[in-house]
Image: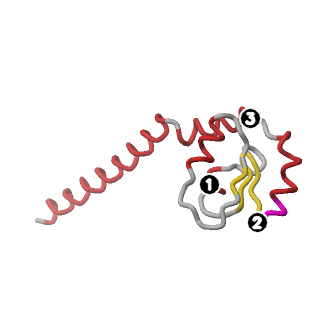
Amino acid sequence: MLMPIVWDEPFGIVMAEAMACGTPVLGLRRGAVPEVVEDGITGFVHDDVDGLVAAVHQLSDIDRANCRARVAQLYSAEAVVEGYLGVYRSVIGVGKKAVGQQCASA
């Protein structure tokens, strides 16, 4: 899949959807592309369109299973839930500390 975005897109779910189907992504180094695409593993990330054009010839080097595995690791329902739980736990832990400190100083 070609992702030649020219703005700093915050995520770009279409990249994750393509990779979930085993489709490598070619994208410019903008926005979330470097976060989603593991350069040389799940696709290629370049600074300009000429780099993307050159990378087309390397697509056969990408193992489609790696694309699916990365999406499962980072964006599956289980991974997202664990991420949210981690944030909630850290916020709750910070709140408990603050309450404990207030009680100790009173």
* In this picture, residue 104 sits left or right of residue 7: left
Marked residue nearer the N-terminal end (1 or 2): 1
Q: Amino acid at mark 2?
A: Asp
Front residue (pair 27, 61): 27
Q: Residues within 10 Å of mark 2 (few under 14, many from 20)?
A: few
Q: Quadrant of residue 5?
A: bottom right
Where is 103 relative to 15, above or below? below
The disc at residue 35 is: 1
Indicate the position of residue 99 as horizontal and vertical percent values.
19, 58
The span from disc 1 to disc 2 (Cα, nearest Å) is 14 Å
Front residue (pair 41, 53): 53
Q: Which residue is mark 2?
A: 47
Where is 79 relative to 9, above or below? above
The disc at residue 6 is: none
Q: Residue at x 64, y 40 (%)?
A: 70
Mark 2 element type: loop
Q: Which residue is mark 3?
A: 64
Marked residue nearer the N-terminal end (1 or 3): 1
Q: Quadrant of the C terminus?
A: bottom left
The residues colored magenta run 47-51
The span from disc 2 to disc 3 (Cα, nearest Å) is 23 Å
Q: Amino acid at mark 1?
A: Glu
The span from disc 1 to disc 3 (Cα, nearest Å) is 18 Å
Where is 52 relative to 83, above or below? below
